[in-house]
Amino acid sequence: IQSTIMLNNGTVIPQVGLGVFQTPDGDTTVNAVQTALENGYRHIDTAMIYHNEASVGEGIRRAGVPRSDFFLTTKLWNDDIRARRGKDAFQESLDRLGVDYVDLYLIHWPADGWQQAWDDLQEIYASGRAKAIGVSNFQKHHIDELLTHSDVVPAVDQVESSPQFTNQELIGQLRAKGIHTEAWSPLGGTGGNLLSNPVLAGIGAKYGRSAAQVVIRWHIQRGIVVLPKSTHAERIKQNFEVFDFNLSVDDMTAISAINTGKRNGADPDNFNF
Ligand code: A2P
């Protein structure tokens, strides 16, 4: 049985979702989404800038899962934040996805103008077309600034987190404010070598699990939402077979000790896109 988390506005989110960053538009995304939903996933995380929202929608329709039975997230891209196009960009995302609401809408990065974008998201939330709103790649200082302007506390902050870059301090700061963390690049991302780390293989051998399953389980037991990406059906299935074993405290500690403190992706205080 998959685990869920209740967000700060009462919305319930399945803890494991399929990530589709760098999943090519067309059949690859359609098949990945359909495979995920047919194998128990009830949570898909996309973004305008992934350029695959229409294919995500097609995969959802092919799987035939009723809209109320799965959780769908998309994100407002930086160009639309800077152009103050929050509300139009949101409607465009709904149209591409072919749905009349999303469960979660996020500001993708703290691009110039994010404060106004948060006002747009609050209006969208009030309209009922997003069941929850939040942010992504916000550091503590961004959250502090946001909370001085807004009564709505973001439901989530989606940030980079993996055994290589645990981001644990920020996660604790978010938790103290009632903001749930979602992990992107939870497996160390594309082209990373995290999954070949012998510590993970050793732990996996004890439980009869792959390194990827061990890492996903580690995220679950940390209490955060985890968004593994794969374009391979077998891996998509495998990444969801993580609800029937428990890592010991010592194993959790050993995985956390892989942390190098170095990001794999962009720095939210210094990005140029
Ligand atoms: P692929 O899509 O070719 O399967 P992250 O979720 O951290 O962004 O990392 C995803 C990376 O890990 C992708 O390169 C993905 O490749 C790979 N990956 C995802 N699931 C597994 C798995 N179960 N075993 C090995 N590699 C995986």
Image (spheres, grey):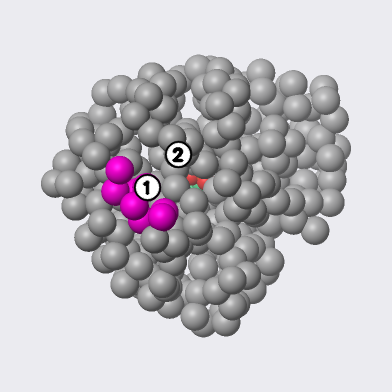
Helix, strand, or loop for circle 1? helix
Part of the protein shown in magenta: 119-126
Give the quadrant of residue 124: bottom left
Residue 164 belongs to the span the image colors magenta: no
Residue at left 51%, top 40%?
Answer: 156
Point out residue 203 in the picture as x, y percentages from the top left corner. 78, 33
Could you tell me the amino acid type at mark 2? Val
Point out residue 115 in the picture as x, y percentages from the top left corner. 27, 35
Residue 86 visible in the current orientation: yes
Badge 2: how crowded within 10 Å, few (<14), some, or many (20+)?
some
Residue at left 66%, top 47%?
Answer: 6
Residue 79 visible in the current orientation: no
**Along the viewing direction, whichever of 85 and 198 lies nearer the viewer:** 85
Q: Which mark is residue 150?
A: none
Point out residue 174 in the picture as x, y percentages from the top left corner. 54, 27
Residue 177's place in the image compared with 71, above or below, is above
- Name the residue that disc number 1 marks: 122
- Are the residues at dot 2 and dot 1 in contact (C-beta closer than 8 Å)? yes
Residue 238's place in the image compared with 109, above or below, is below
Give the quadrant of residue 183: top right
- Name the residue that disc number 2 marks: 152
Helix, strand, or loop for circle 2? loop
Residue at left 59%, top 78%?
Answer: 66
Q: Upstream in the sequence, badge 2 or badge 1?
A: 1
Residue 60 lies left or right of residue 14; in this view the side is left
Q: Quadrant of the N terminus?
A: bottom right
Tally the marks: 2
Most common SS among magenta residues:
helix
Could you tell me the amino acid type at mark 1? Gln
Residue 73 lies left or right of residue 173; in this view the side is left
Residue 87 lies left or right of residue 11; in this view the side is left
Point out residue 100 in the picture as x, y percentages from the top left corner. 41, 72
